Image (cartoon, rainbow, N blue to C red):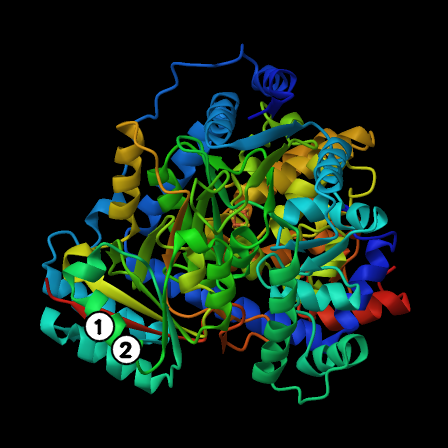
């Protein structure tokens, strides 16, 4: 793809910096401090789950912890609580692993379940917009900020966690890390290894909100109005 | 809009601000809440000074190698199917964006909050070419309906109360419900959903561009940036050229500083990093992607003593502690960048001619410098601006320079400022008459009569301003 005007622009930047243009050889220095590594260092998964649960209260997000065989019941309960008549979920490899393929098939007999289907193109977005509940697996979960990190791709559209009224994140316990530092490290390392990062990495912490009207917190301005995390032992 | 909000004089703007009781109270309470949030989060995180140090090191290194990182960014974006346009001026940026929209036959543009597009006056340009432009951030949408400029970097509609918002919705969109924030927001949600789904083009700003992979990171609570970047088929990101970090790891540090310093949150509801056009088989995201990198006066700041002003991550922490901002509100700065950072940046970007009063809009209490998460020495830069202004106007007696130096030291920490408040009354005696400072030395000169400076005196700012208006203090 095209890059316009970069020579003149970047030469001007270098000139103002008082040196010739640098096109290679720049190394990031070793920073004098790294406070980010110290946050929750050495915490066990259980301790991190406790951190996550506490933070969920601050971000208006319900959280439950279940064993793997209890996952489908927890999903059923949450869907009922949200009075969901329609559900959209990613076509995630983990669906099979967690018995969700079967679960969604059964659920489809009672309510409408749509599994993201790349073949259908934009139709997926239209369905997501009409749907009550979106369900995604978290790829990396940040305990400190109670954030699920979603690597979006053709089987996992961004619309799933964005357009429906409610959002459910399934959090495999193994995905929990102390904070954003570890997610960023993972992405940085992939780049270093020459791997492509996803076209969209979404860090999602609870429902959408705003404080734009007289500083009152209003939940659900554009995205989901309510969110539940289901932490699954694995 | 451009960087300058209008032609009204600073004097009139300040008066308007001071007379607006609702605004002043809203500003004051918002300042308190944001400031407390920031302090609580900083304390909870621990090692706040180490975090600031790290933030400052990352920004310094990046700016010093800006040409290198911008090149790396542009190559990565291009590799991922995006087009990159380097725009030296606002005109070049606007012309390119208009060309893209025209080629796509774009009728409706949906935007996520972006200061740089305000700076270059993009909306008017797009409207002139016949496109409908919708600001999707709730605060920005309210202001757009009301044709009012923003007054705060983080909460742009801070100066409006819910009754005024209800009225605007009723008048402009036939809204007929109550003024409860929930109902108002639900109405906005319903209205804006239609725009997100029908827009041909999405335009966003950029919090941090990640050079190593070409990803653009946007930080929001509402999720409107996700909507704007996921739904329309053509996507344009407009970034000030300094809004860049070398790697994902550096982005993470600065996002952590930004959300804490801005709103006292560990992270906002959404932090979204998207790269170029959608990949094969993907449905969300654009199939046509453009990154516009804007200079518009920024390069002139590089290599000067003001370079670190470009480290700013637009968190508004400096604004939230500024006593002058508290009294006069955002519009008084006549710039889309208000508060201490606005007072530093606006004259750098737009020249002194229209803004020479701005560097005086500070009590030099240094609270801004202490609050800044990337350690920009804001009050020192304000003093330097004043020196330059005085020198340019050939009104620069040596004594004044000495005075300013002493002043900077005196005011360099809030603690020292507080301690010396009493002393200041004595020190300023020669310039003080009837408990107000008539024509103070150095930083007290000029319009800065219009600031909280009678802090050392007994009078309140408001009372003092009133008297000043009556001519008591002329
Ligand atoms: S100058 Fe510092 S405190 Fe002010 S907005 Fe910029 S980063 Fe934040």
- Element class at badge 1: helix
For the residues tagged 2 and 1, is the chain the same?
yes
Give the residue furthest to the top: A20
- Residue B374 visible in the shown view: no
Closer to the camera, A102 or B42?
A102
Q: Position of residue B278 (x, y in %)?
A: 47, 42
Numbered label attached to residue B73: none
Give the residue furthest to the right: B471
Total labels drawn: 2
Question: Does the residue tagged 2 have its C-beta within 8 Å of any atom of ligand 1?
Answer: no
Residue indicated by mark 1: A103
Q: Position of residue B312 (x, y in %)?
A: 53, 43
Closer to the camera, B362 or A146?
A146
Question: Does the residue tagged 1 have its C-beta within 8 Å of any atom of ligand 1?
Answer: no
Q: Are marks 2 and 1 in contact (CB under 8 Å)?
A: yes
- Residue B175 visible in the shown view: yes
Instruction: Decide: few, some or many residues near mark 2? Use Cα within 10 Å; few <14, some 14-19, many ≥20.
Output: some
Q: CA distance from mark 2 to mark 1?
A: 6 Å
Q: Is B223 situated left or right of A98 in this image?
A: right
Location of residue B16 with respect to B70 vertically, above or below = below
Q: Is B12 situated left or right of B249 in this image?
A: right
- Element class at badge 2: helix
* Residue at position x 40%, y 42% in the image: B251
What chain does mark 2 sit on? Answer: A
Instruction: Decide: few, some or many residues near mark 1? Use Cα within 10 Å; few <14, some 14-19, many ≥20.
Output: some
Closer to the camera, B87 or B307?
B87
* Residue at position x 64%, y 54% in the image: B111
Q: Is B49 situated left or right of B354 in this image?
A: left
What chain does mark 1 sit on? Answer: A
Q: Position of residue B99 (x, y in %)?
A: 74, 36
Q: Is A173 situated left or right of B392 in this image?
A: left
Residue indicated by mark 2: A107
């Amino acid at each position: 793809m095209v890059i316009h005007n970069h020579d003149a622009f970047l030469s001007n930047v270098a000139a103002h910096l008082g040196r010739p243009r640098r096109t290679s050889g720049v190394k990031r220095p070793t920073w004098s401090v790294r406070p980010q590594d110290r946050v929750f260092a050495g915490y066990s998964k259980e301790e991190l789950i406790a951190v996550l649960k506490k933070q969920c209260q601050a971000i208006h997000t319900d959280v439950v912890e279940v064993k793997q065989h209890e996952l489908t019941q927890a999903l059923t309960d949450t869907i009922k609580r949200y009075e969901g008549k329609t559900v959209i979920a990613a076509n995630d490899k983990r669906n099979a692993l967690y018995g969700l393929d079967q679960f969604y098939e059964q659920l489809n007999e009672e309510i409408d379940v749509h599994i993201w289907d790349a073949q259908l193109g934009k139709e997926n977005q239209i369905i997501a917009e009409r749907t009550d509940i979106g369900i995604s697996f978290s790829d990396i979960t940040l305990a400190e900020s109670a954030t699920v990190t979603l690597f979006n791709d053709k089987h996992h559209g961004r619309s799933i966690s964005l357009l429906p009224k409610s959002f459910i994140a399934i959090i495999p316990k193994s995905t929990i890390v102390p904070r954003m530092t570890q997610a960023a490290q993972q992405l940085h390392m992939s780049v270093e290894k020459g791997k492509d990062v996803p076209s969209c990495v979404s860090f999602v912490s609870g429902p959408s909100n705003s404080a734009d009207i007289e500083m009152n917190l209003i939940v659900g301005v554009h995205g989901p109005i309510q969110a539940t995390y289901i932490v699954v032992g694995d | 809009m451009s960087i300058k909000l209008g032609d009204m004089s600073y004097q009139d703007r300040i008066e308007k601000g001071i007379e607006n009781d609702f605004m002043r109270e809203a500003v004051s309470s918002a300042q308190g809440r944001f400031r407390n949030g920031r302090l609580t989060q900083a304390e909870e995180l621990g090692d706040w000074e180490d975090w600031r140090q790290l933030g400052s090191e990352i920004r310094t290194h990046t700016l010093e190698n800006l040409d290198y990182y911008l090149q790396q960014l542009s190559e990565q974006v291009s590799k991922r199917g995006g087009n990159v346009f380097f725009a030296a001026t606002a005109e070049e940026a606007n012309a390119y964006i208009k060309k893209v929209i025209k080629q796509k036959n774009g009728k409706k543009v949906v935007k996520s909050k972006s200061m740089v597009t305000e700076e270059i006056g993009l909306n008017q340009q797009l409207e002139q070419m016949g496109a409908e432009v919708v600001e999707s951030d709730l605060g920005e949408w309210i202001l757009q309906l009301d044709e009012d400029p923003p007054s705060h970097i983080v909460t742009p509609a801070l100066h409006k109360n819910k009754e005024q918002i209800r009225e605007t919705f009723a008048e402009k969109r036939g809204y007929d419900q109550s003024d409860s924030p929930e109902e108002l927001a639900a109405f906005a949600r319903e209205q804006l959903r239609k725009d997100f789904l029908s827009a041909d083009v999405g335009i966003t700003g950029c919090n941090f561009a990640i050079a190593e992979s070409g990803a653009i990171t946007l930080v929001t609570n509402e999720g409107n940036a996700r909507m704007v970047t996921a739904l329309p088929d053509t996507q344009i990101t407009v970034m000030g050229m300094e809004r860049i970090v070398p790697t994902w790891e550096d982005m993470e540090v600065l996002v952590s500083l930004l959300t804490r310093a801005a709103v006292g949150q560990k992270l906002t509801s959404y932090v979204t990093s998207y790269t170029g056009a959608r990949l094969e088989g993907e449905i969300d995201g654009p199939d046509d992607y453009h990154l516009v990198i804007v200079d518009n006066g920024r390069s002139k700041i590089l290599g000067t003593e003001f370079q670190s002003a470009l480290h700013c991550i637009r968190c508004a922490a400096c604004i939230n502690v500024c006593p002058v901002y508290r009294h006069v509100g955002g519009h008084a700065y006549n710039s889309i960048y208000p508060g201490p950072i606005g007072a530093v940046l606006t004259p750098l970007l737009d020249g002194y001619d229209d803004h020479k009063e701005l560097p005086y809009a500070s009590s030099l209490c240094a609270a801004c410098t202490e609050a800044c998460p990337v350690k920009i020495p804001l009050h020192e830069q304000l003093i330097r601006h004043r020196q330059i202004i005085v020198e340019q106007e050939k009104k620069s007696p040596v004594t004044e320079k000495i005075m300013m130096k002493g002043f900077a030291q005196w005011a360099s920490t809030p603690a020292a400022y507080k301690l010396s408040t009493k002393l200041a009354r004595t020190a300023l005696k020669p310039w003080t008459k009837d408990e107000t400072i008539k024509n103070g030395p150095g930083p007290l000169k000029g319009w800065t009569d219009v600031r909280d400076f009678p802090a050392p005196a007994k009078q309140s700012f408001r009372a003092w301003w009133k008297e000043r208006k009556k001519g008591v203090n002329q």
